[in-house]
Image: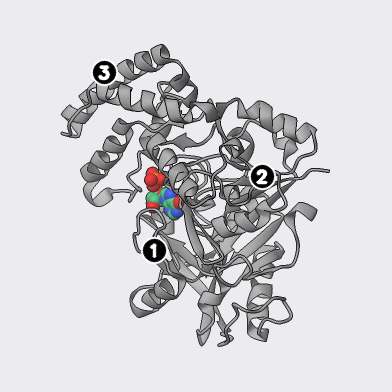
Amino acid sequence: MGKNVVVIGIQWGDEGKGKIVDILSEHADIVVRFQGGNNAGHTVVVGTEKFILHLIPSGILHPGKTCIIGNGVVIDPEVLLDEIGTLASRGHFRAEDLVISKDAHLIMPYHKRIDIGRERLRGGRKLGTTGRGIGPAYEDKVARCGIRCGDLLSEEDFRLKLRLNLHEKNHYLRTILHEEGFEIHEIYHKYMAYAEKIGRYIKDTSILLNEAIEHNRSILFEGAQGTLLDIDHGTYPYVTSSNTVAGEAAIGSGIGPTRIDTVIGISKAYTTRVGEGPFPTELKGEEAERMREHGGEYGATTGRPRRCGWFDAVAARYSVRINGLQGLVLTKLDVLDDLDEIKICTAYRYKGEIIRDFPTETTVLSSCEPVYETMEGWKEKTSEIKSLDGLPKNARAYIKRLEELLGVEIIIISVGAKRKEAIILKNPFDL
Ligand code: IMP
């Protein structure tokens, strides 16, 4: 029997999904991206080679796996072609393995300019977006004026939609953002050239996926960003513009929710966040610096230093609930290897009261003080360890405590960047 497994991040993104999806891809026939765009950066280390993928599912690094970019993704064709080119030059691209949904929306040059211009206009209240045009592209989708991949296949439709859009966007860019506008022909020719190159990949991916399910194929749904960046359930407005939670796997790929068998969450053994917004367990100064350096906590997409802090069990418990998690993958345990003490936030103190449910309101969350439980560190290198029993006693105690606090089983523990540096206790395709 084929199994369909959804893998999502349960923090503010950058949980190490790329590596885990890469490991799990081996058990799947198809790997699907279902939301987000090239704001994501999934880092995968294969042997001595490092790959950073922004749009193409990490499954591309496994020959013979079909990689689908679903309708819920927003696609910048320039980035996609760059990624194809880079993978091809390194011998990791097979044209027959890539399929792009005709209904996925396109990121247009004006989306990027609006994203950047608007952040500038927000000044001190900026969101810290990746500047890739993600938000404005999703806005157009909801405003029902977006241009989709399928439109690239009809020059006439594309030109008409572009003209209507530019009429509004140029006005907005010039008068509100004081930016330059665009000429229709420059975008038109550029995108028609893209169409020639990517047209062959554009298909009805919902049909393909549902047929695969009928034929008992196994599918891995690869989330991008994390639950706390979800447009509905995250720390709004400091979120991304798509639904990053497990439920989106169905919507963003065109399968029914009844087709999903298992939902797995990924979390770091501590917490990070990029961009603005409240972060109760954030560390400052030397402690933060140490975590950042040991964890290599710099954005895979923008290179920005990530904010670092202790594991937040209040936030993680919330993500377990919102996603209906059936198992958890804990990543980067090794980053904590040399600490004397490790803290876990088990509750918040808000206006003198203890709260255990995660508040998504920015004003409340930014006034929450973490209540910590302190555990002894293990002061031993873990990256070579292959079994749970082989882990130091204090590391096992840490893992057990997280399981108790979250009410979910930890099924994989990642102890390094390489494929083999993972302790696999259960395979989500067998759950
Ligand atoms: P946007 O997705 O570029 O609009 O950015 C909105 C917020 O989401 C910003 O705080 C970004 O730093 C954050 N964000 C977007 N994508 C990622 C990601 O893949 N990892 C971590 N943070 C992200």
- Label 1 secondary element: loop
Mark 3 vs mark 2, foreground winner is 2
Does 255 sit left or right of 375 as displayed?
right
Residue at image coords 40%, 15%? 155
Report which residue position mark 2 lands on: 64
Picture quadrant where residue 256 is located: top right
Which percent across, then down, holds residue 46? 56, 62
Foreground: 321 or 186?
186
Report which residue position mark 3 lands on: 167
Residue at image coords 30%, 39%? 115
Picture quadrant where residue 246 is located: top right
| Residue 30 drawn above or below residue 341 | above
Report which residue position mark 1 lands on: 298
| Residue 87 drawn above or below residue 177 | below
Foreground: 62 or 152?
62
Label 1 packing within 10 angstroms: few (<14), some (14-19), many (20+): some
Foreground: 34 or 43?
43
Q: Examine the rendering and report whether any part of residue 361 can be seen.
A: no
Distance, label 1 to label 3, CA atoms, is 38 Å
Label 3 packing within 10 angstroms: few (<14), some (14-19), many (20+): few
